[in-house]
Image: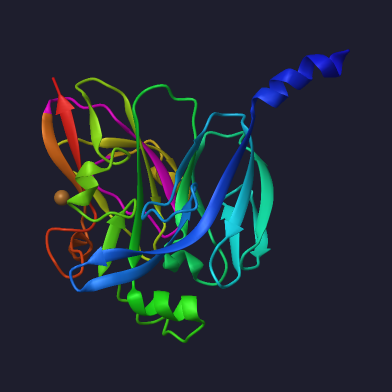
Amino acid sequence: MFSLMVLPAFALSQKTVNLYIVEGEVNESNGFVPYFTFSTTGSFDSSNAVLRFDLGEVVTFNVKNETDFTCAFSITDHGQIEGIPMGETQSITVTFSQEGTFLYEDPFNDHRALGLGGMVVVSDFSGPEFYGVFTEHDEEWINAIADGGVYDKRTYSPDVFTINGKGFPRTMFDTLAMIMGHVGDTIRIHITNAGQMYHFPHFHGYHVKIIEASKHDHYVGWIKDSFGIAPAESMTLELVPDKPGRFPVHNHNLVTTTYGGNYPGGMMMHMFIYE
Ligand SMILES: [Cu+2]
């Protein structure tokens, strides 16, 4: 029976992921900025869950909205849930049939500016992989969006900048973004801009090859040390270190290397490369 031969393989590749839309806060020098993220546990973590799947996996996402307003859920190029009323759970099943780095978010109104943007990686790569979701936080927008208030879209002035929900030096303790490897390794770095403004990662010490860019198609194949990543864009980068050393990766728009007005902070991560 043909179907009996197919069924076990299909069942093996099935997976379920529970996501909770939860509220917390990021801590900065002047106090706390409210911040919403997608969590896999139901308790707040300032890092939106980075979700990595093997090529060909079939995944059901059960998304529970624990806020007190209507949310939604989408994965770039893979579909969306239109509306999730407060307190409810809705599901979507996705087949991941292409390798890549994808933004997932709450696409409802400007909800991504609440913090609700993360990364899905579909990969068959077996070497070291690292992940950075770049986001900025504007307290006025967040309060207005969350409370149904009014905000001026022309005056976006975030003063907290994070990678995976952490500002430097907390990025140094983030195993997702703390790039470690050896000379000659082939390392993959996945980046997503979940913010509202362009970001400009700059790699000190090395060049990286852009192997996928969801908006800047013409970047693919370029070997660069700095480039722009558009809002809602995702990229996959390849790093083959040619020398040992410790080098930063920071955002070249220098305001983003502050955190609550303090420098150094914000969007800065590090590479530790060994002999
Ligand atoms: Cu630099």
Above-or-below relation of 68 to 240: below
Magenta span: chief secondary structure: loop
Residue 251 or residue 67, whichever sits in front: 67
Question: How many numbered marks does the figure carry?
Answer: 0
Above-or-below relation of 99 to 260: above
**94 displayed left or right of 168:** right
Image x and y of residue 152, in percent: 41, 85
Q: Extreme right residue here?
A: 1
Image x and y of residue 28, in percent: 22, 66
On the rendered image, what quadrant is the C terminus found in?
A: top left
Residue 204 visible? The answer is no
**18 displayed left or right of 173:** right
Task: Assess whether residue 95 is covered by the magenta stretch.
Answer: no
On the rendered image, what quadrant is the N terminus found in?
A: top right
Task: Assess whether residue 232 is covered by the magenta stretch.
Answer: yes
Q: How is the image coloured?
A: rainbow
Image x and y of residue 63, in percent: 60, 53
Residue 153 placement: quadrant: bottom left
- Identity of the residue drawn at 71% across and 25% down: 10
- Identity of the residue drawn at 19% across and 59% down: 257
**30 displayed left or right of 142:** left
**184 displayed left or right of 140:** left
Q: Which residues are magenta?
A: 224-244
Image x and y of residue 129, in percent: 36, 31
- Identity of the residue drawn at 39% across and 82% down: 154
Residue 221 visible? The answer is yes
